[in-house]
Amino acid sequence: MPELPEVEVSRQGIEPHIKQKVVTEVRIHNGRLRWPVPEDVQRLCGKTIDAVHRRAKYLLLESKVGSAILHLGMSGSLRVVEQSEPLKKHDHVELLFDNGLALRLNDPRRFGAFLWQSPGEAHTVFAKLGPEPLTDDFDAKHLYECSRGKKVAVKQFIMDNHVVVGVGNIYANESLFKAGIHPKREAGKISLARYQKLTPIIKDTLAAAILQGGTTLKDFAQSDGKPGYFAQELLVYGRKGEPCVQCGAELQEIRLGQRSTIYCKKCQR
DNA sequence: CGGTCTACCTGAAAGC
DNA sequence: TGCTTTCAGGTAGACC
């Protein structure tokens, strides 16, 4: 399940293979993703990829005539392979390059997206997004001020893209545990001091995951490269019923907004 | 407008 | 064993 670190790792993984390369062909094997893949993406043919950027969990493959916007959804992954490599099941969209390589979007559940944005335009998916978590625009003051008057649980609050982007279920669980904050606590009733503890923890958790992922990038261009999933030291996520690493109490599971939420009832208040 | 809920998907795992 | 059900979850949009 790609969260922001996985998306950033994917960006770093594909960039050296496709930057400054010319797209020779766009092949849409199955255009029925979250939204139909627009014909506009064919405009990339014959154009050079000038840059590969990330905003939230979206990747932008930028050219002079516009940008392809990619989202990995729940189950998506990107691979760079030789064009002769046989397609795998669920390889839905493919960009061929003048260096003999192909970028393939594989997405079994098809929650992902492959969209188009003309120069100077901002696609609607980018409207109303909160700050990037790893920039200075995201700080404790922002969380504190955004949360005043909000009754929503703090876990759902930090997962809200309007508040801050890129904090998915796994990292929300992990960050709240490390900060000692109960996931159900009302966002609007949490002190500035507690947000001052939480904010750097979110940043550190995401940054550490990106660094770990970076070490697995070597094989990105190989057919069996498996970017997106890397060894991550998870303290609570997926550990329901196991003992808390801090106090030994049995980790609890509740559901918040239909999402699995794991926490320690002793360490998180 | 804030808050909550749902649809979109497939495959793995659990349940029967 | 094999069929059926549940669950996983990011995000936009519907809904009250």
Image: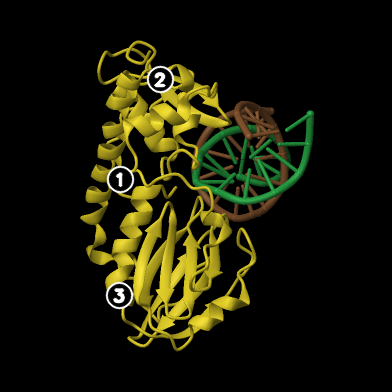
Chain colours: A yellow, B brown, C green
Going by the numbered disc 3, the residue's amino acid type is: His
Q: Nearer the viewer, mark 2 or mark 3?
A: 3
Q: Is residue A14 visible?
A: yes
Q: Position of residue A56 (x, y in %)?
A: 42, 51
| Residue type of the residue flagged with mark 2 | Gly
Where does the image place residue A14, in percent across and percent down from the top left?
Answer: 33, 68
Up-down relation of residue B1 to residue A124 (above or below): above
Residue A1: image x %, image y %? 44, 47
Q: Which residue is mark 3?
A: A17
- Residue depicted at 61% across the width and 58% down the height: A34
Identify the secondary structure beneath mark 2: loop
C-alpha distance separating marks 2 and 3: 43 Å
**Along the horizontal axis of the image, is A22 left or right of A26?**
left
Q: Secondary structure at mark 3?
A: helix
* Residue A109 sits in quarter: bottom right
Circle 1 — which element? loop
In the rendered image, which residue does mark 2 sit on?
A: A241
Query: Which chain letter matches label 1?
Result: A
Badge 1 crowding class, 10 Å Cα cut-off, few under 14, some 14 to 19, many 20 or more, is some
Instruction: Please name the residue shown 30% across and 75% down the image.
Output: A17
Q: Nearer the viewer, residue A5 or A151?
A: A151
Is residue A120 rendered to the left or right of residue A251?
right
> How crowded is the residue under tag 2: few (<14 C-alpha within 10 Å), some, or many (20+)?
some
The chain ID associated with circle 3 is A
The circle drawn on residue A134 is 1
